[in-house]
Image (cartoon, rainbow, N blue to C red):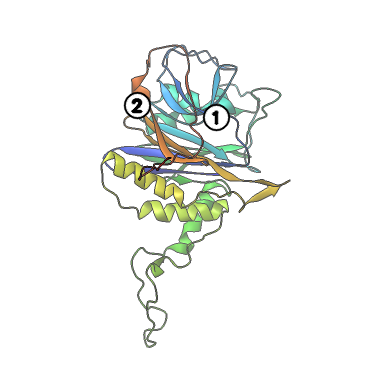
Amino acid sequence: MCTAVTYKTNDFYFGRTLDYEHSYVEEVTITPGNFPFHYLETESVPVHYAMIGMAYVVQDYPLYYDAVNEKGLAMAGLNFPGHAVYRERVEGKDNIAQFEFIPWILGRCETLEEARRSVEKINLLNTPFSDKLPVADLHWIISDQSGSITVESVEDGIHIYDNPVGVLTNNPPFDIQLAGLDAYMGLSAKEPRNTFAPGIPLEHYSRGMGGIGLPGDLSSRSRFIRASFVKMNSVSGSGEKESVSQFFHILGSVTQQRGCCEVGDGKYEISIYTSCCNASKGLYYYTTYENHQITVVDMHRENLKGDKLIRFPLVKGEQFCEQNELKRE
């Protein structure tokens, strides 16, 4: 399970948690503009927009979980079990395998509106990457500084939803996730007024009572509500450090701790990594479950005109800053 969010100050930020019980050895991966993408059912694309994101690289192919291209368009795929449906080839459509969807969109689209038009022409294929990597049940959030959409390929076709909160989790389908916010319209960052019974002298016994009722469990529906509330009420400075710090605090409200979500056989779902990309500048920040120190990769420090993947293994292991010097004998 996962959560993706957007945030905007002076720049536009996009990121997510990857919540799962094990890692696929993902890496921060830059795909330069001349890296050849060979698609299963459409023509190869030798030149495209460069992109940076988190990917599992197999046979020199970046299977992106999330990425941002050099134009500031961002996209992430999140688990969508029980609802995702992909199809055989359809004549007259852009037939794109599910694992090709992120590079297909980010390689050719500069804006969210261009991405929307491209999705309208797509048929997502049920072809796996390999025998060892079956087709993943996913839905996607696509965003730029102008807004977000959610894309779902389900039984009755591809749905494109406007996403006014810029947040996505897993199940249920997005229209139901969004409608679920209706039940929480009374929540507020401010102290509540006594509308229960004005004649009864009810009192505030704590700060934060305007948020009473905000779900605190780890289910995808509750994480959507909680992340939306935190994101939509977030206040930060507009500089890079303040913005990035606030972004990680937003996702911190929905991270998963080992031991709280058992998935069987002594395995637990955890937030394997948390990312925040300054989509405006191509800066990819991340933390891992074992390392709370924020690490950053700048795509513009690399050769974006090259034809080879540029890969950065994740920095793991907790990093400690010793504020006072240890005395040694």
Q: Quadrant of residue 70?
A: top left
Q: Is residue 227 left or right of residue 9?
A: right
Q: Tell me where residue 23 appears, x and y as whole percent.
A: 60, 34
Asked if residue 160 shows in the view, the reply is no
Q: Earlier in the sequence, mark 2 or mark 1?
A: 1
Residue 278 can be seen, yes or no: yes
Quarter of the image where one finds residue 139: top right
Q: Residue at x 65, y 28 (%)?
A: 126
> 295 above or below 323?
above
Hey, what amino acid is under mark 1?
Glu
Q: Nearer the viewer, residue 55 or 27?
A: 27
Q: Amino acid at mark 2?
A: Lys
Q: Nearer the viewer, mark 2 or mark 1?
A: 1
Count of numbered circles in the view: 2
How many other residues sit within 10 Å of disc 2, few (<14), some (14-19) or many (≥20)?
Answer: some
Q: CA distance from mark 2 to mark 1?
A: 23 Å
Label 2's element?
Answer: loop
Which quadrant, please, contains the C terminus? top left
Q: State yes or no: discs 2 and 1 in contact (Cβ < 8 Å).
A: no
**Residue 24 versus residue 242 in the image, above or below:** above
Q: Which mark is residue 71?
A: 2
Q: Which residue matches tag 1?
A: 26
Image vertical order of residue 246 relative to residue 158, above or below: below
Residue at horizontal 37%, vertical 24%? 299
Q: Residue at x 29, y 39 (%)?
A: 240
- State the residue lying farthest toward the bottom: 199
Q: Position of residue 275 (x, y in %)?
A: 45, 38
Other residues around mark 1 within 10 Å, as few (<14) / some (14–19) / many (≥20): many
Label of residue 46 in the image: none
